[in-house]
Image (cartoon, grey):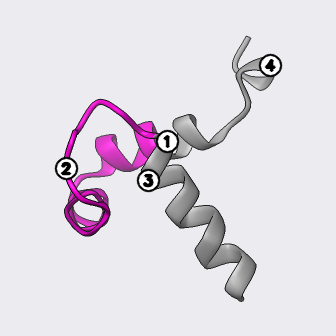
Amino acid sequence: MLKLGRIALNALERESSFRRSIRQKSRRAAMNDQYMISVLAAALPNSTLS
């Protein structure tokens, strides 16, 4: 369970379109599906996106 939380924090840290605190990014991702998708895409290695 701890690893999953760490993965989520890393994804929020890597996402750069919304320059705010991790707490604000987390809340925005919870309320905005499109932003959640961008956070998840930021967590993926670049090789899987092509």
* Sequence order check, earlier mark of 3 and 2: 3
Which residue is tagged 2? 20
Q: Are marks 4 and 2 in contact (CB under 8 Å)?
A: no
Query: As drawn, is 17 to the left or to the right of 11?
Result: left
Which residue is tagged 3? 12
* Sequence order check, earlier mark of 3 and 4: 3
Three-letter code for the amino acid on which mark 1 is drawn: Arg
Query: As drawn, is 33 to the left or to the right of 31?
Result: right
Query: As drawn, is 37 to the left or to the right of 16?
Result: right
44, above or below 33, in the image: above
Three-letter code for the amino acid on which mark 4 is drawn: Ser
Q: Where's the N terminus, which quadrant? A: bottom right
Q: Quadrant of residue 31?
A: bottom left
Report the residue at 19% width, 50% height from top. Answer: 20
Q: Nearer the viewer, mark 4 or mark 2?
A: 2
Predominant secondary structure in magenta? Answer: helix
Q: Are marks 3 and 4 in contact (CB under 8 Å)?
A: no
- Across and down, in percent, residue 9 comes to 51, 64
Name the element at disc 2.
loop
Which residue is tagged 1? 14
Q: How dense is the environment of label 1, judged by Cα within 10 Å: few (below 14), some, or many (20 and up)?
A: some
Report the residue at 22% width, 40% height from top. Answer: 19
Which residue is tagged 4? 47
* Sequence order check, earlier mark of 1 and 2: 1
Q: How dense is the environment of label 2, judged by Cα within 10 Å: few (below 14), some, or many (20 and up)?
A: few
Q: How dense is the environment of label 3, judged by Cα within 10 Å: few (below 14), some, or many (20 and up)?
A: many
Q: Are marks 1 and 3 in contact (CB under 8 Å)?
A: yes
Q: Is residue 25 magenta?
A: yes
